[in-house]
Image (spheres, rainbow, N blue to C red):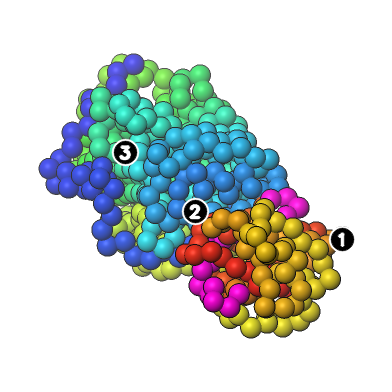
Amino acid sequence: MRKPVALRLSAALGTLALAAATGVVLNMPTASAAAAGATGYATQNGGTTGGAGGTTVKATTGTQIHQALCARAATSTPITIQVEGTVTVGNTAKVSGTGCNTAAGVIELKGISNVTLVGVGAGAVFDQIGIHIRQSSNIIVQNVTVQNVKKSGSPTSNGGDAIGMESDVHNVWVDHATLVASGGESEGYDGLFDMKDGTKYVTLSYSVLRNSGRGGLVGSSDSDLANGPVTFHHNRYENIDSRTPLLRGATAHIYNNYYVSLNESGINPRAGGKAKVDNNYFKNSKDVLGTFYTDLPGYWQVAGNIFDNVTWSQPGDENNPAGPNPTSNTTVSVPYAYTLDAASCVPSIVTATAGANTGLKVSDGNCAATTPTATPTSTSSPTTSASPTATSSPGGTNLSIGADSDGSSKASGTSYGNVRDGDTGTYWSPSGSTGSVSIKWGSATSVSRINIREASGATGNIGSWRVLNGDTGAVLTSGSGAGVISFAATSLKKVTFEITSSAAAPKVAEFETYA
């Protein structure tokens, strides 16, 4: 099998590669959390909703992402993990728990379901660390940058794939992602977006794939033919040697993508693979569609595409380009509704919408960018980590009065019971700067708000915290500072307030709970 040559990085893109390698991100606007719903083949087979309906947790390191997964009651408990900051191999450790199966040095989504991983705030950058999805389903990855993941050299992660899926994965939606490398296989990189070993019902939308020898594949070998279908739409592929994507036996719907500088080959269906290629724009590229590097043919249905300065090689034993005048040699039926932008506006609409930190903008179907709103059937718009509001009572009956309490530790002269006695003159304080205190009942009690009152003279001491379902360990919400904290109503016997950082000795005078 003949392989494409190593990536030839252009001088014009050198600055972008340098920024990616150093983790520099410029002009990164505040991004909202997941909006609108899945598209394409990810809507089939029961749909893809990720962590909709579950709790929302914020993470700034890979270890915290793993902790959020592991704190769930079960591997299928819905959760949205909002990521802000730079995740690296160095801050991503293995974590164990009932809701996870993680590994160090890689974001491991293994043997789980019902998860949304979304970049928020100043942005989420996964620097030299890949996202590995294995034996999992109903996963959404949105608004993240994954850069310079290597399979050789140092550090290595995820076999060199920015996002890799394998081993009975289904219903994955990757949206508004930026996936970049700084070279090809000889420089230590592999694919940007790979699917193999039974990966099905996937959509990649509004994303940027750049500066890599390999864009991605569906099927790792000519015997790995049970993958797909996959949808690729409104993505920008730029300065890629090949595989945009490579389809081994799989079916793909590929529409409204913008391809710039495909150096050796582009969309490559083979071994029975089929591609429905609609209204894409190909520019300054070579052999953008056909079967390459094999004598096992693939097939395509083409309509409405624009080929702008595209060159085509001559046919050969292992080379069957679709051009210079591509015509269909199969038909592909698509089971979902979609709207095509005119190919002529694809460069402008994809430039305005694709990639992380573009405000999750999408096309309105008429070549104009718009910001969608969340719908009941899509991923819930995650809220930011809870910011306590007022310290006055939120109203209703304080369920802590008459309940019981316990905790992780207590400083000399303090008591767990002091947080539920209605007296702000007494308080609990941990033996150190961090610790937890819980309110508990003899039977399940519905709680949706708590009020943390700090003792006199200790106002502002409490830093970051998590609220946990004491029955299961699941994180109900997280944030910083004392006051009223709201979360989805939860029936439980025990609720825990865990202080994870503090400016000085934390002192909780009252831990009030409300339905």
Residue under numbered circle 2: 59
**Rendered residue at 60%/80% (across/down):** 391
Between circles 2 and 1, the one closer to the viewer is: 1
Residue under numbered circle 3: 148
**Rendered residue at 84%/71% (across/down):** 402
Circle 1: residue type: Ser
Residue under numbered circle 1: 443
- Looking at the image, do the residues carrying marks 3 and 2 touch, with CB atoms under 8 Å apart? no
Report the predominant secondary structure element of the magenta stretch.
loop
**Which badge, 2 or 1, comes first in the chain's sequence?**
2
Circle 3: residue type: Asn
Q: Can residue 513 be seen in this view?
A: no
465 in magenta: yes
Residue at the outermost left position: 11
**Rendered residue at 45%/53% (across/down):** 60
Q: Position of residue 49 (x, y in %)?
A: 60, 54
Which region of the structure is painted magenta? 455-473
Q: What element carries label 1?
A: strand
Disc 2 crowd rating (10 Å Cα; few below 14, some 14-19, many 20+) is: many
Circle 2: residue type: Ala
- Looking at the image, do the residues carrying marks 3 and 1 touch, with CB atoms under 8 Å apart? no
